[in-house]
Image (cartoon, grey):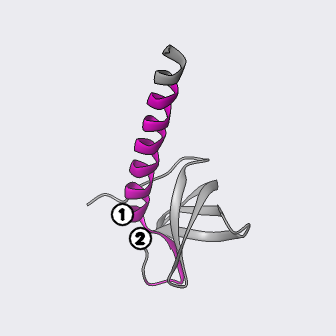
Amino acid sequence: MAVETYKLNDTVVVDVFGVNRVGFVVEKSKTVKGFRYLIHTEDGKEHENVYVDNGTVTTYINSRLTKSFVKSQTQSNNLINDAIDIVNNK
């Protein structure tokens, strides 16, 4: 299975010492082990040297939760946009 990669400003879910935080990609660099990310999380903290699905460290991007969270946010935004369209057409 291929490891997920993310672009700058992509929303991600980061596991920080067992607590999930939502954040976004600030910086991305290629290394021998894959891509290393700098993540800015919702609590205002920045996490350096973050890799995808590397459960052997204390902070990593959880690609499964990220995919689920982004899908949920997209569906919510679509519902809001549909409601706005309905109100504006009346």
Residue lying furthest left in this view? Answer: 1
Q: Quadrant of residue 17?
A: bottom right
Q: Which residues are magenta?
A: 56-84
State the image quarter where residue 40 is shown: bottom right
Q: Nearer the viewer, residue 76 or 52?
A: 76
> Is residue 33 in view?
yes
Instruction: Name the residue that disc number 1 marks.
Output: 64
The structure residue drawn at horizontal position 46% and vertical position 48%, both measured from the top left corner, is 73
Q: Main secondary structure of the magenta part?
A: helix
Please tell me whether residue 38 is drawn above or below residue 47 in the rendered image. above
Q: Residue shown at 49%/51% (left/top)?
A: 6
Q: Earlier in the sequence, mark 2 or mark 1?
A: 2
Q: Position of residue 61 (x, y in %)?
A: 49, 67
Q: Secondary structure at mark 2?
A: loop
Q: Count neighbours of disc 2 (C-alpha within 10 A) and say few if under 14, some if 14 to 19, many if 20 or more.
A: some
The disc placed on residue 72 is: none
